[in-house]
Amino acid sequence: MLLKSELKLEGLNKEDLFFFLSDPLNIEKVYPKQLKTKVRKQDDRYSVEIYLLGQFLNFELMIKEIKKYELIVDELRGPLFKKWINVHRIIEKGKELLMIDEIEFETKLGFIGDFFAKRIIERIINYRNQSLLKIFGKEIQPLFIDPLQIDLIKGTSLLAFLTIFSLAILIFLPRNMIIDLIAGLISWILLWYSVHDLFHFIFGNIFGIRFSYYYIGFSNLIKIGWIPERIRLLAITFGIKINRKKSTASKFGYAIMYFAGPLASMLIPFIPAIYLSMKHSTIAGYFLLFISLFNLLFTAYFSPKYGCISKGLRVLKK
């Protein structure tokens, strides 16, 4: 996929713009603060750490081609992209400079990944362009609106609705083996997906933790190296941002909040299995019981190492 961007700058010589763009360390100055970008030089290449989709992701940046004052071509390698080539062109037009970006990229998730990545990249590039205008003298306040951020009220309402809906379909659908199995699977998946952050929110508020917003991001499964990369990248879920400035919880309150999410997603999905077993839908019930047990064992192993239980344990050690 090809993404193009143009930026006009007045009262600036091309040498200053070229030298600024040719130093990747300046990425920290022009990227949104929410991305917590850190750039480090390593010989002839640079390591770039970005907080994206709820996780810190590490990329490698290399300058592939330079034509002094005219052209910079860089290549990015990392966990999300099969291909990323960014061509920066600087064109002088009278008293104006025209900076043209051509970003050719391909995600590891195919055209669907490309579609969603394009929306995020466009927002980042727009913020970067505003930052460049400010750095070079224009009075402007750069603004970054994360397309994956969800209002706290809307997000909580959605998770509550999914939880109620997942239970309702078990009760009100007509009974037969195939429908039981399909309804049970839908119920199980929705419960597993929705209750994790909903219980973070509920128990967090009980113990004095305040939150800013929900976001769509990667599950902590992305940290487990032995899971195939494509599966890890497909593990998209809800996350919730803690507002630590407004929170008054003790370390025990934080620990309970962290523990509540994985415990909910381990135990509550047993409800469809138990309900269907009690209604004599033994095949559907036993199948859901099997995947519930697998989920319980997997999360009990995974979460203390990489997930929310590990965060709760770290809080208690402070």
Image (cartoon, rainbow, N blue to C red):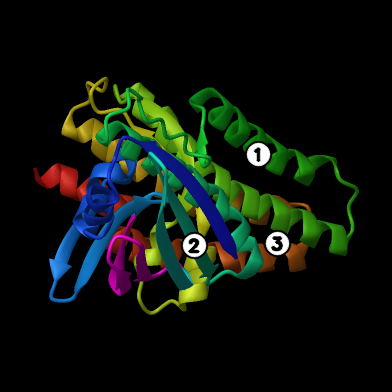
Between disc 3 and disc 1, the foreground one is 1
Find residue 171 and report its horizontal and vertical position in percent.
79, 41
Image mark for residue 162:
1
Quadrant of res 58: bottom left
What is the C-alpha distance between the residues marked 1 and 2? 38 Å
The amino acid type of the residue labelled 3 equals Gly
Span of residues in magenta: 56-80
Say if residue 121 shows up in the picture: yes
Residue designated by label 3: 285
Image mark for residue 103:
2
The local crowd at label 2, few if under 14, some if 14 to 19, many if 20 or more residues have their Cα within 10 Å, is: many
Find residue 16 and report its horizontal and vertical position in percent.
22, 48
**Which quarter of the rendering shows the C terminus?**
top left
> What residue lies at 75% left-to-right and 38% top-to-bottom?
168
The local crowd at label 1, few if under 14, some if 14 to 19, many if 20 or more residues have their Cα within 10 Å, is: some
In front of the other: 193 or 65: 65
The local crowd at label 3, few if under 14, some if 14 to 19, many if 20 or more residues have their Cα within 10 Å, is: many
**Relative side of 216 to 42, left or right:** right
**Relative side of 254 to 270, left or right:** left
Disc on the earlier residue, 2 or 3: 2
